[in-house]
Amino acid sequence: MVAACSEERFSRVKQDAGLPIRATRWCLAHAGIAMEQVEAVVWYEKPLLKFERILVSQLLGFPWTLESFRRTAMTWLTDKLWVKNALCKELGIRPERLLFGDHHLSHAASAFYCSPFERAAVLTVDGVGEWASTSLWQGEVGQPLRRLAEVRFPHSLGLVYSAFTAWLGFRVNEGEYKVMGLAAFGQPRFADQVRKVLRPTGDGGFAVDTRYLRYHQSATESYSAAFVDLFGAPRFPGAPLDPTTPEGRRYADVAASVQAVLEEAILVLCGALHERTGLTDLCLAGGVALNVVANRRILADSPFRRLYVQPAAGDAGGALGAALWAWREVLGGAPTPAGLVPGMGRPWPDEDLERLLTELHLPFRDCGEELLDHAVEDLRAGRILGWFQGRCEWGPRALGHRSILADPTRPGVQETVNARIKFREAFRPFAPSVAAGAEDRYFDLLPGGQGPAEWMCVVADVKPDARALLPATTHVDGTARLHVVKPQANPRYHALLTRMGQQTGHPVLLNTSFNLKGDPIVATPLHALSTLQASGLDAVYLGRFRVDRRDLPGADS
Amino acid sequence: MRCADVPLDLALRPVRALAFRLPGRPAAEMAELSQAEAGGGLDMLEACERTARADLRRQFFLHALDQLRRSRLFRQRAAALAQARSRTTAVLEDSGYIASHGIRGADPLYSELGELRFLAYVWLAERRSARRFAAYQRLMAGDPAAAGMFAEIGRDGLLHVTYSRAELDLARQRGEPVTSALWAVRRRCAWQAWMRFSRRVGDLFAGLWLAVVYLVVLGPFSLLARLLERDEPGLLAPEADDRSAAQRAWEQA
């Protein structure tokens, strides 16, 4: 792999669903490849099959699907059905070089072909692709990925979870993390009600009772009146949510219940997959693979001993999987390692950063070789830093290239980061980054979780004696969304953690994505500087240069 | 960033003043302005990255910071005035608003227009914004916080009008075709306004037409779909497909 980047980093539209034209052009330019040299462009799903599923769903919902039909027909007939033409026109590629993967095949390939495993079971779980919402696979190097079984729409773990996300007043496809964070505050006392919506079928799969749901018939509503009868009134989006109040507790209990039932369903799927493959290594992909709490449960309670999740496990990773699948299975490419590292996006060399800062007439300090000392000094003084180093991350996690950093051992730092910068709900925890080798001092990472921990895709128990030490990154249930940093994956960030450890005794940092609420993660130094101006960050380190917020014109007080 | 006054816009000004009195309208306007300014700020950041002139890079950067700050101020005011589940909250929470409402295109505006036309665009857009903000200041005189905000923003806007005008004057002195650039931008803006209007009308008629198709054509097919419906929960064997990987990859179904 040479380059990978999401369109949202260019368009600045979070989770941009448009064609990734600018991202594609940048990847090609970065690799020095002209479009005429490209053997194949691979789209990650089959548009006609997807349209068929949408149309059939609307036919089955007649006459209650008028509005949904009107919306989807206008989108599909004017845009999505013609993806082939649009790609050929925008990218200048010949039609015969345009290939189409399959949604879940792309997910499966993105996990298995990036994993270190020679043979593995592969589970893909998301909202829905063409027809499948969940697929079971077996992968073996040198062999095509083999699909063993699938669960089809409208039976979908991802869409049920999203329905609860909407009921809890969060945005679908964005607020699922919040449901997961809220769940730790509750007890699963509504689990039996959730099981009315989502029940196991006894064959390793599950079924959804569509009487409670609307997603199969509506473009805007996820749940039905029967759902509200079952769980009560939904929460207004934006209304205060305090899990210590009776009403907040009820929402937290529902979140805990859906999380518990989701985990049960995933464990049953894992059992069925293990039974069919006999393998003990599992690759996981699809949006549900970003549920880090469920991933821990897989390590704890499933027959699988090792787990691999790549950082863009959601639909953004479909591009990666589609390309790897076509390379290996269509074009007959060599089964070389994919070479996925945290930073696959645009690099910003120090010379470019220095020229930019000089031309902007911004006061800055060239830290040179003392960069790490300056950054640690800032962190020890309680300052909150933007950390813009090297290439942009691939996927939704900030992995030390575009991160906001703080010292997690300082009391009140979580509240400060929330109040001054992220404006997140107080119940959502921040993640800790720890230098590889030191994680055992603070965390009980389950065996087999090392791979996902490198991509911040699993939670670990914080050791009881470390909880008071790391209050800002320890969730209410005593877990943390751990990020283990190896020197070969991110040398500068690992060096910063190590230097922090040398000076404070604790090579741990609070790490959250470098963005403001609602924005994609920053991609360029200009985005970083505008975020510095708009937020309560104290300073930003752009390469080896430090810019203080007080030196920026018009910084908000 | 939207640019120049177009005749329709001017003609609608009194109507807007009346509409502003509708309940919830000021908050919704603030939300829309917030999105427009955010889009403009992003355009300016892209211009800042792309221009070859160091002096302009700083101007564009400062301009971008101002626009993004305006956006935040409008957002805060809109949120303060908004009611739960109103149009205002829908606009504020719509992460795709900037793209879906034509505030920004798929390609960077600076790359599309080139430097001279981009400067012409900035001047026209800022001049228009200054007028609009002055009008808002009057319309929101009963809301001291909003009126104060518009007064402050108006001062910033004046700086943007001044620097972009100065740049155009310098370009004129260098013999660059400033007048034709201004007219090209005006034509582009008028065309885009027409396209937005046409799209709305088109969407309306397409919606009506699709409703007819749905009721007349899809009805019978829905009976057929129900007859053939197979609700198959649980784990299913994958459908047999004897095509090779290459054959499958070629097809969209």
Image (cartoon, grey):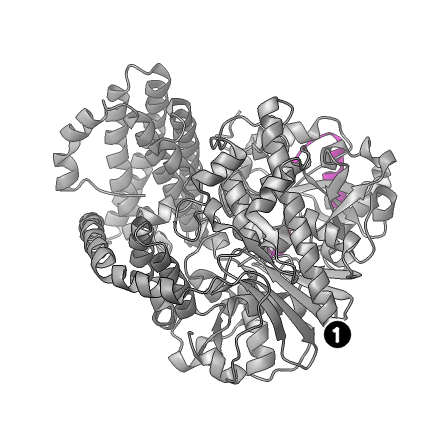
Q: Position of residue A237 (x, y in %)?
A: 47, 33
The chain carrying label 1 is A
Q: Is A234 placed above or below A244 here? A: below
Q: Residue furthest front?
A: B227
Q: Is residue A334 magenta?
A: no
List x then y, in percent, for residue B229: 41, 64
Asked whether residue B222 is in view, the answer is yes
Q: In this view, does B171 lie above or below A417?
A: below
The correct choice, above or below, for B10 with respect to A105 in the image is above
Is any atom of residue A545 visible in this view? no
Q: A518 above or below A138?
A: above
Q: Quick one: quadrant of the N terminus of chain B?
A: top left
Q: Which of A522 and B97 is in front in this view?
A: B97
What amino acid type should be assigned to the residue bearing mark 1? Glu
Span of residues in magenta = A372-394
Q: Which of A422 and B54 is in front in this view?
A: A422
- Decide if residue A304 is on the left or right side of residue B249: right
In this orientation, which residue lies closer to the viewer: B136 or A196?
Answer: A196
Look at mark 1 in the image and give the residue it sits on.
A118
Q: Where is residue A443 in the image (x, y as percent from the top left)?
A: 82, 44
Quadrant location, the C terminus of chain B: bottom left
Q: Which residue is found at the position 39% from the left and 45% from the top?
A: A220
Give residue A490's quadrant in the image: bottom right
